[in-house]
Image (cartoon, grey):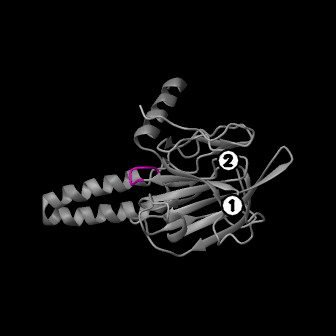
Amino acid sequence: MNTEFTDSLKKIRDTLVPPIHPAGWPFIIGFAFVTILLSLVWDGFGVIGLVVTIWCFYFFRNPKRVTPAREGLIISPACGHISSIVPDVTLPAELDMAANKNPDYTRVSIFLNVFDVHVNRFPIAGKILQKAYQAGAFVNAAFDKASEENERAAILFESEYKGNKYEMAVVQIAGWVARRIICNAENDQLYLTGEEFGIIRFGSRVDVYLPKGVYPMVCIGQKMIEGETVLADLTSKEKAREGVTR
């Protein structure tokens, strides 16, 4: 078979039927089994169950991403919309190993609705300094207070670029629907930009803490693609951007 034709078929397959994150299979199989049982009771129940099963399959999709390869770029760790950009904040209190405890960071928050990809990817190559889990509430993840009040898993990491070391953090935050954060990062582990490190189930938020002097290259309301959209650039001297909705 023609190689070019085969590649085209693979692209179509990956678009229509993307890979599924392993954490999703128990839910997909469970919903499918319940759907079969419901259809034995009434066909209408079976249709409803089928719709839910298809949605569950869609929710746990894990499509391949093309991550920009240039060093110094900070890439979005999550798929969703920028819900807030807050300058002059400190890192989460649970990250007690942080060398800098001053309000020198800019927090960029990405809100994920139930239709976004929920697999999380590392924003820039670096070494994990600390992983911390914090129990909390489950208020709407779109609210700013979710960064401090909600259940979350915070990762403190260090990235080196041209001899300079940058301490940053990425935080997975559960929302009012989400009840499970999966974070596979471990202390002293090395990650590449765009590499998977976890998933949050059913609606949530991810915060990125940019170090002093590094300004976000995105605007509130902008759509993010995990592992692809450039969030910031360690080499850029451009101030924070402003967006216009058209």
Q: Which residues are magenta?
A: 113-117
Q: Residue furthest right?
A: 163
Question: Looking at the image, which residue is at 70% across and 50% down?
Answer: 192
Quick check: 12 above or below 204?
above
Disc ID at residue 193: 2
Question: Looking at the image, which residue is at 49% across and 65% down?
Answer: 146
Quick check: 70 above or below 151?
above
Residue 2 in view, yes or no? no
Give the crowd class for mark 2: few <14, some 14-19, many >=20 residues within 10 Å: many
Quick check: 169 above or below 3?
below
Q: Residue furthest bottom?
A: 135
* Residue type at tag 1: Pro
Q: Relative to 100, is 111 on the left or the right? A: left
Question: Looking at the image, which residue is at 73% across and 38% down?
Answer: 237
Label 1 secondary element = loop
Q: Where is residue 232 shown, x and y percent of the image?
A: 65, 43
Question: Looking at the image, which residue is at 45% across and 45% down?
Answer: 18
Mostly what secondary structure, the magenta segment?
A: loop
Q: Where is residue 172 shown, x and y percent of the image?
A: 55, 62
Q: Quadrant of the C terminus?
A: top left
Residue located beneath label 1 in the image: 103
- The answer to the question of whether label 1 and label 2 lie on touching residues, with beta carbons closer than 8 A, is no
